[in-house]
Image (cartoon, rainbow, N blue to C red):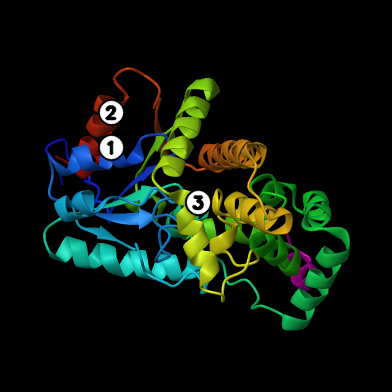
């Protein structure tokens, strides 16, 4: 009981810091780490891949030396990583961090992972290889955007959060619909009732101005190009075992650079126009990703919103996180 005679809430299992790409999550996390003993658990479906450093804006070696980071460089780009595996890994790691007397800060932009952690994953049916093969065959003939359009008719909520070319998730959503007759969004709502959302309080960095976020996205992608992003993708292609259909190579930026390198091989020369087109396509795709991330965020219950384009955004975010941590 507290002084007012009311039951006090138990401390959170971990704090969540979410936002679209380029919204300033890393800067807030590192600033909080200078005030509180914490460890960062990445909530990012791209940072799990080894050898994908520049195009994922992976924390630098210095940043990772200053603050322990987890769920980074976890799997090879030829492997897949799922929301269910994330929940298991993040829950275990958060418990280990708390046992060390430190605060788990779950920071990132993969909203599916945040939702799975905070709202739960229902017992959806397992994969059906025959149905997946049939969906792959349809996609080869009609294109994934056509299957995405079909998904929009039967499960508009899920379709709104997925890109038309997100093969893995569009396929899974259609598979669940065809196997059960229930849209995936209903399965996820069913799990939410028993999920410990309050145990994972969420601060969301959301810009008022799209222009502000778009400018940051363009500047960050240009910085990636300057840091050698094209060479990073060349090295991944040179392995010989990766292809554009893998989840890792469908990540925003990687997909566009891979396609540009394909075009160079076909034409036997790299024209300035080809690289300008690649840059424009990657920035446009990243903007679309940010839009979908914000759509996910705005559907999440109990989040505390900080305008990340406000002059005092970092101070506001730190104050919210300190309060939620009980500091």
Dot 1 crowding, Cα within 10 Å, few <14, some 14–19, many 20+ = few
Judge whether 276 appears above or below 117 on screen: above
Task: Return the residue found at the far right.
Answer: 141
Q: Disc 2, disc 3: CB below 8 Å?
A: no
Q: Name which quarter of the figure residue 146 lies in.
A: bottom right
Q: Which numbered disc, 1 or 3, marks the residue that appears first in the sequence?
A: 1
Q: Is residue 48 visible in this depiction of the protein? A: yes
Q: Is residue 145 left or right of residue 324?
A: right
Q: Position of residue 62 (x, y in %)?
A: 19, 50
Q: Which numbered disc, 2 or 3, marks the residue that appears first in the sequence?
A: 3
Q: Disc 2, disc 1: CB below 8 Å?
A: yes
- Residue bearing mark 2: 314
Q: Name which quarter of the figure residue 201 lies in.
A: top left
**Alpha carbon separation for disc pair 2 and 1:** 8 Å
**Alpha carbon separation for disc pair 2 and 3:** 32 Å
Q: Position of residue 89 (x, y in %)?
A: 36, 69
Name the mark on residue 230.
3
Q: Is residue 45 visible in this depiction of the protein? A: no
User: Which residue does the image show at 75% across and 70% down from the upper left?
Assistant: 180
Q: Quarter holding the C terminus?
A: top left
User: Which residue does the image show at 78% across and 57% down from the upper left?
Assistant: 144
Q: Is residue 29 left or right of residue 122?
A: left
Report the span colored magenta: 177-183
Q: Name which quarter of the figure residue 91 lies in.
A: bottom left
Dot 2 crowding, Cα within 10 Å, few <14, some 14–19, many 20+ = many
- Residue bearing mark 1: 27
289 or 8: nearer the viewer: 289
Dot 3 crowding, Cα within 10 Å, few <14, some 14–19, many 20+ = many
């Amino acid at each position: 009981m507290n002084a007012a005679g009311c039951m006090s809430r138990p401390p959170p299992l971990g704090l969540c810091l979410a936002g679209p790409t380029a919204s300033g999550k890393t800067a807030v996390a590192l600033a909080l780490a200078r005030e509180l003993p914490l460890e960062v658990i990445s909530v990012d479906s791209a940072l799990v891949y080894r050898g994908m450093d520049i195009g994922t804006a992976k924390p630098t070696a210095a940043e990772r030396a200053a603050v322990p980071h987890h769920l980074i460089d976890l799997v090879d780009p030829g492997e897949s990583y799922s929301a269910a595996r994330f929940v298991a890994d993040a829950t275990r790691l958060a418990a280990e961090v708390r046992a060390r007397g430190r605060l788990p800060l779950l920071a990132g932009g993969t909203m599916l992972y945040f939702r799975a952690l905070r709202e739960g994953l229902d017992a959806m049916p397992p994969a059906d290889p025959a149905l997946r093969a049939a969906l792959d065959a349809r996609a080869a003939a009609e294109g994934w955007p056509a299957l995405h359009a079909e998904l929009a008719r039967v499960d508009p909520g899920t379709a709104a959060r997925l890109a038309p070319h997100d093969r893995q998730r569009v396929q899974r959503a259609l598979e669940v619909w065809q196997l059960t007759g229930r849209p995936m969004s209903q399965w996820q709502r069913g799990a939410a009732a028993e999920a410990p959302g309050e145990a994972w309080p969420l601060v969301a960095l959301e810009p008022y101005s799209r222009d502000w976020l778009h400018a940051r996205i363009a500047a960050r992608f240009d910085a990636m190009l300057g840091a050698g992003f094209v060479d990073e993708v060349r090295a991944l292609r040179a392995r010989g075992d990766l292809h554009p259909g893998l989840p890792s190579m469908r990540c925003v930026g990687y997909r566009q650079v891979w396609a540009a390198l394909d075009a160079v091989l076909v034409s036997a020369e790299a024209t300035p126009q080809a690289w300008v087109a690649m840059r424009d396509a990657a920035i446009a795709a990243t903007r679309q990703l940010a839009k979908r991330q914000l759509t996910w965020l705005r559907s999440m219950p109990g989040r505390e919103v900080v305008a990340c384009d406000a002059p005092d955004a970092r101070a506001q975010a730190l104050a919210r996180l300190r309060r939620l941590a009980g500091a």
